[in-house]
Image (spheres, helix red, strand yellow):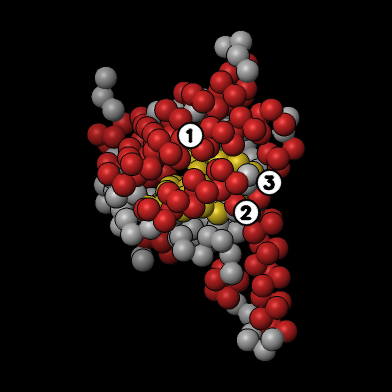
Amino acid sequence: MESPKEHIDLQALPNHVAIIMDGNGRWAKQKGNRRIFGHQNALKAVREVIEAGVELNLGYVTLYTFSTENWKRPKAEVLGLMELLVRTIRKETPILLENNIRLRAIGNIEDLPSRPYRELMKSMELTRDNTGLTLTLALSYGGRADILAAVNRIAAKAENGELIPGQITEADLRKEMSTHYMPDPELMIRTSGEFRISNFLLWELAYSEIYIAQKFWPDFSRDDLYQAILDYQRRERRFGMISEQINTL
């Protein structure tokens, strides 16, 4: 069977793809297993997407790994997720190095337990000089919290005279956000058929194209990523303008 990859225009790729990896628990429940079983089997989809991103030479992939709201889940599930995070980072770091992938993280990562925090920081340090794909994990992340933290830093700078109230720009605010190093996503993918962004990259998704996959995340494959990119390439991105204006740019 022909892969959707064969039809992708390699000159019109999104530079940054952000993904809400949804449906692990429901996938596991359908199979009569505990929710953690779904999270464990989600790693295959992560590898598929990262490998495809490297093949396509994407610049950035951001994965919504653990939200600020996820701390409210049952304690056993949270502990299982944190242990899985430790094992995954430890196992995958050599692969990141081999493929020139830089690992970064956004969110309140200081809230992580000590072991996953240490593994994360170690992997980010080991891969910091890599120049290929930038893989960002959104951990203990919430879009509202990120904007609020940036606003508080802006307010402190204004109070100190570093910024002038009334003359603060979007660029000033963006510099204070945890996502300051990445371009806005051109494409955001959410699995499991849910039509919401769940407090993910609220500022950055302002003009992103959104693709909803009906599959649960553990079943998501590289061909599904290719299909999402094909769908993205069929769309006309107008940024508030009309088609005639876009066609003259």
Real-space CA distance between mark 3 and mark 1, rounded to the nearest whole angstrom = 21 Å
Q: Which mark is residue 229?
A: none
Residue at left 26%, top 24%? 2
> The residue under label 3 is which amino acid type?
Thr
Element class at badge 1: helix
Picture coordinates of residue 44 (x, y %)?
42, 28
Image quadrant where residue 34 sits: top right
Q: Residues within 10 Å of mark 1 (few under 14, many from 20)?
A: few
Element class at badge 2: helix
Answer with mark 2 or mark 3, whichever residue precedes in sequence. Answer: 3
Picture coordinates of residue 15 (x, y %)?
38, 53
Q: Taking the image as drawn, is residue 214 in sight?
A: no
Which quarter of the rendering shows the C terminus?
A: bottom left
Picture coordinates of residue 98 (x, y %)?
27, 44
* Residue placed under numbered mark 3 in the picture: 68
* Residue placed under numbered mark 1 in the picture: 87
Q: Where 41 sits versus 47, above or below?
A: above
What is the total number of numbered labels drawn onto the structure image?
3
> The residue under label 1 is which amino acid type?
Arg
Which quarter of the rendering shows the N terminus?
A: top left
